[in-house]
Image (spheres, rainbow, N blue to C red):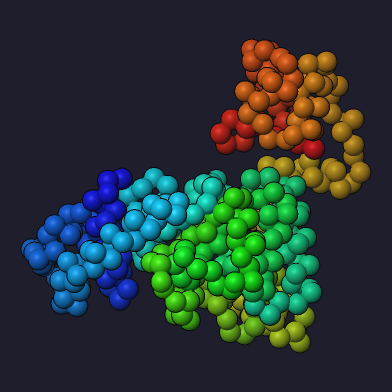
């Protein structure tokens, strides 16, 4: 992506707050932010029915360009990636949404286009019940689906509980913020956020020096919903931001789930209403969720383990296969170049043995040529 295109997108982002739908239509029609900026005085010739408000906003492009240049410099100096709609690293699921941001600011290591992406949201006043649901769900999900990106909003309550449990289980997790990447709200979550930058990431549509205003939290929910395959509401009062995320998920044709709670529990009322009104599917466990999503890759093995069936039921392994399994037990999820070092086996022998282990149901291949031991 050229600096010119990034700068043009930054400028459009700066003026897009009340004109995002119109700018997105214009962007899709013209094909690039650069073309819009170069022709901002003649947009009516490209889209005759462009709204007068949008045409008026575009006149501010020369005014906001210095701010765009300053933002680009800040991002370059602080290791922040700028992901435009045309960037292959931009979340492809979010790109499908009509109100997707023209540009995202991202700091992290996670692939935002992983095969499986979910969000977990809920009340900021979660109970011990909610915390336990999050812990057990993520712990069990890790056994069923080792590769899932978990998204939330880094807020108090269910959000931070989801992030911390994801980190503990070795999942990558991304927090979508309601302000720029020069600050963090709430500050109490700074340590967790720093860990997420190394094991996931922080994502926002907002420039630096943007306050964490209430409306920004509402707007960021569309990113949480849009970049995910499914939304999971853990606890919610009758009104709350997580219900907005659930509604957006349905509007984006994403799967939406909710954990039920006691009828009298105030922070289960929202979830119970979602289930009652058929706006979310009821789940009580990770296994329910995986089954509903059709993600049963490892479910059979997990069920066998829960029933007390030991690994000895698998076909016997030869010496080479045993060496590979032992290496994966020491360090799971390895590419073949690492396995050849840890097993002292030639790649040709490794390749054939790994194929046999896959047929026996002992290992599986993950994205990126990574071999995972089904333990």
Q: Quadrant of residue 98?
A: bottom left
In the image, is 12 to the left or to the right of 282?
A: left
Above or below, 185 against 301 in this view is below
- x and y, in percent, of residue 366 in the image: 62, 36
- x and y, in percent, of residue 256 in the image: 58, 65
| Quarter that holds the N terminus | top left
Closer-to-camera residue (347/183): 183
Above or below, 303 against 193 in this view is above
Residue name at image x 78 percent, y 60 percent? 136
- x and y, in percent, of residue 212 in the image: 48, 76
- x and y, in percent, of residue 126 in the image: 71, 77
| Quarter that holds the C terminus | top right
Q: Count the marks: how many?
A: 0
- The answer to whether one can see residue 291 in this image is no
Closer-to-camera residue (226/313): 226
Residue name at image x 23 percent, y 51 percent? 4
Q: Quadrant of residue 361?
A: top right
Above or below, 15 against 139 in this view is below
Residue name at image x 68 percent, y 35 percent? 333
Above or below, 297 against 279 in this view is above
- The answer to whether one can see residue 178 in this image is yes
Residue name at image x 39 percent, y 56 percent? 75
């Amino acid at each position: 992506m050229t600096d010119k295109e990034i700068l043009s997108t930054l400028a459009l982002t700066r003026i897009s707050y009340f004109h995002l739908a119109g700018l997105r239509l214009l962007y899709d029609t013209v094909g690039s932010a650069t073309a819009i900026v170069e022709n901002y005085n003649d947009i009516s010739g490209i889209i005759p029915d462009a709204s007068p408000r949008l045409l008026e906003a575009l006149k501010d492009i020369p005014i906001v360009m210095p701010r765009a240049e300053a933002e680009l410099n800040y991002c370059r100096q602080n290791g922040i990636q700028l992901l435009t709609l045309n960037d292959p690293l931009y979340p492809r699921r979010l790109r499908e949404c009509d109100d997707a941001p023209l540009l995202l600011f991202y700091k992290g290591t996670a692939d935002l286009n992983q095969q499986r992406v979910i969000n977990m949201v809920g009340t900021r006043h979660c109970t011990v019940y909610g915390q336990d649901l999050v812990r057990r769900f993520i712990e069990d999900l890790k056994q069923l689906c080792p590769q899932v990106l978990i998204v939330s909003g880094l807020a108090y309550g269910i959000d931070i509980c989801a992030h911390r449990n994801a980190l503990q289980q070795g999942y990558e997790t991304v927090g979508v913020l309601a302000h720029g990447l020069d600050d963090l709200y709430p500050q109490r979550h700074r340590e967790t956020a720093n860990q997420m930058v190394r094991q996931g990431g922080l994502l926002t549509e907002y420039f630096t020096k943007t306050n964490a205003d209430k409306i920004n939290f509402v707007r960021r929910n569309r990113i949480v919903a849009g970049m995910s395959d499914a939304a999971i509401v853990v606890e919610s009062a009758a009104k709350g931001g997580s219900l907005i995320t659930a509604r957006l998920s349905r509007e984006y044709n994403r799967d939406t789930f909710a954990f039920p709670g006691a009828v009298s529990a105030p922070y289960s009322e929202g979830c119970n209403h979602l289930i009652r009104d058929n706006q979310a599917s009821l789940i009580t466990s990770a296994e329910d969720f995986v089954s509903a999503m059709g993600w049963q890759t490892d479910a059979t093995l997990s069920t066998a383990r829960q029933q007390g069936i030991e690994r000895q039921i698998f076909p016997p392994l030869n010496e080479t296969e045993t060496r590979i399994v032992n290496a994966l037990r020491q360090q799971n999820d390895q590419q073949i170049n690492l396995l050849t070092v840890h097993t002292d086996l030639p790649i040709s022998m490794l390749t054939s043995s790994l194929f046999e282990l896959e047929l026996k149901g002992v290992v599986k291949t993950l994205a990126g040529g990574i071999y995972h031991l089904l333990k």
